[in-house]
């Protein structure tokens, strides 16, 4: 049978070694290394090697204490560290994989008082001003990279990735934005690129010719005074000559106000910039960012944008990505939806990374779906994310599962999310659930409201009936000008030109996005998306930074909340700012600290410390949170039936698909 993805699955000959395919698992911080549980780290990477990744890159390892992203960040500092890392490399090799260690020096992004950089300029994302390095200090940092690379080789790694992008230490020397030096490390571009080139040259000298050196090159800085494309080409030529084996693409400094990996970024939205490097260097080039399925990967390679694809989060969502693609089972690949909710949001909260779609990610040693000793008859009521995940895991374990759903479709609240412009990836998640349920032995009963009688005779009953909108009890809310988010998103009720949205939680933001959009979602149109966020070509403008063009808004929206804090403050840690910026660009007014006194045909009367105010609007949309749908659970419990209540039916507050899926998977693993 011919390969379904001939380009993606083609081997890549690096001369001294060959990668089995064109898929790199990109670097991600897991949080496991710092906890010292190296067997768990090894199990995590081993599963990804077994799943067929051509080359794995580890999470960033600090070359020195001052270069660590935070105090205590993992590195390769001692012989004991080398022994720990050997567990990882052996596990990967035993499973047929190859692995490179990323050397990450954070420079002024290091969240600690010891941080160092080219110049003493504080970054906007860290409270610590860096110390400007002197000549001896720079020599120490170079040597630290070299020592880290030689230790990596000793620990059994197949190579290293030198992190030169995303605004980290080496990138800080490259750009006038952060490098104000007047010595041989600053000023002209030749001087500014001296450090990364010297690092690669000295690392190559130390590790010998048969060791992979990936250089992560910033092709688009997206900050003021960023690099021009001519400068980037000059750097690339010098880095190649210094001994790099492969270029990997880096997009956007962490302080950039442009989303680079969030779900609303178009798929393969930055492959065009990697393509600009193709043909200018003699070593393979990898592209990256928002490539989450084999079809997009194959297309990017077929269009000549790169020699290889880097995917990071997709390997959290599904370790067997490559294997499933190769076996013609692409539809079974659990999709990374770019939400950041369980990966980056966890990283930035000091929690272990995982995945909304795959709660086993980074929990491989403790959450396993092993065959049930005694197969049971299990009823699951509700086919939202909690019920679906419970049903799938229980089925996988050998139980006989019946899934009841009162609607005509699977997916529950995911079906509301998928209609929001910028959240198109939720279609893929619903499709994946449909595929997996279709391939399972689950008996699906759609359009069926489960009754206590229908649930008799089951060994276990799981109630995942979800949520209903909270009634905010505002006088006048029964008027024809008031809609719920379900009326708007599911029933497509007509919405007037002037809109007040009551409640600025996740759903209030989603509804505001939905009603202000017109025409095609920019997530499906790379050029429109680039205009909206001000992403230019580094050949035309340094760093590729343009002034964003505000999209025309379909409606005049005011988003309201009672709390006096900034609306949207509780949205995702790494994505909340994107939602706020997107609505601000559409002219949405966000007002906190109000009371809802009365709804009239003219609009809504608000109270605040500034006194009463009449907000004249045509439509008021209620997004005032949700409460558990517990009717069935209460009836069953009242009749003495033992049930498991999960998802929103259990706790509606702060419910999201992450908690629902996680709770469902963990329950089903124990039944
Ligand atoms: P939510 O995030 O809890 O927000 C509810 C909003 O309603 C808040 O702004 C709250 O603010 C307001 N509210 C609460 N009680 C009210 C009352 N009695 N009268 C008037 N307003 C009231 O809930 P949600 O927006 O329904 O979202 C549900 C869940 O879905 C969220 O927890 C979220 O995790 C998830 N979700 C996430 C995303 C995402 O982008 N990640 C998107 C959509 C949904 P005040 O009390 O200050 O008025
Ligand atoms: Fe992707 Fe979301 Fe999973 Fe992170 S949590 S890997 S963004 S699906």
Image (cartoon, rainbow, N blue to C red):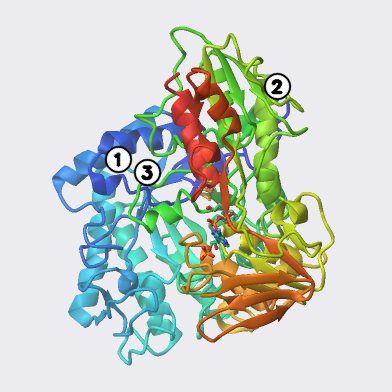
- State the residue lying farthest toward the left: 79
In 3D space, how far apart are the residues under numbered discs 3 and 1 (Cα atoms)? 6 Å
Label 3: few (<14), some (14–19) or many (≥20) C-alpha neighbours in 10 Å: many
Quadrant of the image containing the C terminus: top left
Q: Are marks 3 and 1 in contact (CB under 8 Å)?
A: no
Q: Which residue is mark 1?
A: 156
Instruction: Pick whichever of labels 3 and 2 is earlier in the sequence.
Output: 3
- State the residue lying farthest toward the front: 475
Q: Nearer the viewer, mark 3 or mark 2?
A: 2
Confirm whether residue 251 shows in the render. Answer: no
Q: Which residue is mark 2?
A: 444
Instruction: Pick whichever of labels 1 and 2 is earlier in the sequence.
Output: 1
Mark 1 C-beta closer than 8 Å to ligand 2:
no
Image check: 517 left or right of 48? right
Q: What's the residue at 65%, 44% (across, down)?
A: 413
> Where does the image place residue 605, in percent across and percent down from the top left?
66, 76
- Label disc, if present, on residue 211 of the rendered structure: none
Closer-to-camera residue (259/136): 259
Confirm whether residue 277 shows in the render. Answer: yes
Q: Is residue 228 above or below residue 427?
A: below
Q: What's the residue at 58%, 65% (across, down)?
A: 504
> Where does the image place residue 474, in percent across and percent down from the top left?
64, 63
Closer-to-camera residue (33/416): 416
- Label disc, if present, on residue 158 of the rendered structure: 3
Closer-to-camera residue (662/646): 646
In 3D space, how far apart are the residues under numbered discs 3 and 2 (Cα atoms)? 47 Å
Label 2: few (<14), some (14–19) or many (≥20) C-alpha neighbours in 10 Å: some
In the figure, residue 138 lies in which quadrant?
A: bottom left
> Where does the image place residue 656, in percent across and percent down from the top left?
53, 47
In 3D space, how far apart are the residues under numbered discs 1 and 2 (Cα atoms)? 49 Å
Q: Nearer the viewer, mark 1 or mark 2?
A: 2
């Amino acid at each position: 049978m011919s390969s379904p993805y001939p380009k993606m699955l083609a081997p890549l000959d690096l001369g001294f070694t060959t990668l089995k395919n064109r898929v790199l698992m990109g670097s991600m911080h897991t949080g496991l290394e710092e906890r010292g549980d190296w067997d768990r780290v090894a199990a995590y990477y081993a599963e990804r090697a077994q799943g067929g990744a051509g080359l794995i890159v580890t999470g960033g390892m600090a070359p020195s204490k001052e270069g660590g992203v935070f105090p205590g960040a993992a590195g390769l500092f001692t012989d004991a560290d080398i022994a720990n890392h050997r567990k990882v490399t052996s596990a990967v090799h035993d499973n047929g994989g190859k692995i490179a260690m990323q050397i990450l020096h954070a420079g002024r992004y290091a969240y600690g008082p010891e941080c160092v950089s080219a110049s003493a300029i504080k970054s906007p994302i860290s409270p610590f001003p860096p110390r400007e390095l002197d000549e001896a200090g720079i020599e120490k940092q170079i040597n630290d990279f070299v020592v880290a690379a030689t230790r990596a080789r000793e620990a059994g790694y197949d190579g290293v990735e030198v992190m030169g992008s995303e605004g980290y230490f080496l990138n800080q020397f490259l750009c006038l934005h952060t490098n104000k030096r007047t010595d041989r490390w600053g000023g002209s571009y030749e001087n500014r690129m001296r450090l990364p080139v010297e690092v690669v040259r000295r690392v190559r000298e130390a590790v010998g010719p048969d060791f992979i050196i990936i250089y992560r090159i910033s092709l688009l800085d997206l900050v003021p005074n960023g690099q021009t494309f001519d400068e980037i080409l000059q750097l690339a030529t010098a880095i190649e000559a210094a001994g790099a084996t492969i270029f990997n693409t880096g997009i956007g400094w962490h302080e950039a106000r442009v989303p680079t990996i969030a779900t609303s970024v178009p798929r393969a939205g930055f492959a065009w910039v990697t393509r600009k490097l193709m043909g200018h260097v003699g070593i393979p080039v990898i592209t990256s960012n928002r490539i989450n399925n084999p079809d997009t990967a194959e297309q990017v390679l077929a269009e000549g944008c790169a020699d290889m694809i880097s995917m990071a989060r997709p390997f959290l969502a599904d370790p067997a990505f490559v294997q499933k693609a190769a076996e013609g089972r692409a539809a079974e690949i659990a999709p990374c939806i770019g939400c950041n909710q369980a990966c980056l949001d966890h990283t930035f909260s000091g929690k272990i990374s995982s995945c909304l779609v795959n709660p086993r990610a980074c929990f491989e040693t403790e959450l396993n779906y092993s065959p049930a000793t005694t197969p049971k008859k299990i009823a699951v009521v509700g086919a939202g994310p909690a019920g679906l995940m419970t049903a799938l895991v229980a089925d996988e374990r050998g139980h006989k599962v019946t899934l009841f759903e009162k609607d005509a479709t699977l997916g529950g609240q995911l079906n509301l999310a998928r209609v929001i412009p910028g959240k198109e990836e939720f279609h893929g998640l619903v499709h994946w659930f449909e595929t997996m349920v279709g391939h399972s032995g689950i008996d699906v009963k759609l359009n069926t409201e489960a009754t206590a009688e229908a649930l008799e005779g089951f060994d276990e009953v799981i109630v995942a009936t979800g949520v209903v909108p909270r009634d905010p009890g505002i006088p006048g809310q029964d008027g024809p000008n008031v809609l719920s988010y379900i009326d708007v998103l599911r029933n497509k009720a007509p919405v007037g030109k002037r809109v007040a949205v009551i409640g600025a939680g996740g759903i209030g933001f989603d509804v505001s996005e939905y009603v202000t959009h017109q025409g095609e979602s920019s997530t499906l149109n790379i050029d429109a998306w680039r205009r909206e966020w001000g992403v230019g070509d580094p050949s035309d403008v340094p760093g590729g930074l343009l002034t964003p063009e505000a999209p025309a808004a379909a409606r005049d929206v005011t988003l309201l909340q009672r709390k006096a804090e900034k609306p949207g403050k509780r949205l995702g840690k790494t994505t909340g700012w994107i939602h706020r910026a997107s609505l601000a660009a559409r002219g949405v007014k966000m007002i906190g600290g109000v009371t809802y006194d009365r709804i009239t045909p003219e609009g809504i009367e608000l109270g605040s410390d500034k006194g009463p105010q009449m907000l004249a609007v045509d439509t008021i949309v209620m997004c005032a949170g949700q409460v558990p749908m517990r009717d069935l659970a209460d009836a069953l419990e009242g009749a003495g039936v033992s049930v498991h209540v999960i998802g929103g039916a259990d706790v509606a507050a702060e419910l999201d698909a992450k908690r629902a899926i996680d709770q469902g998977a963990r329950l089903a693993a124990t039944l």
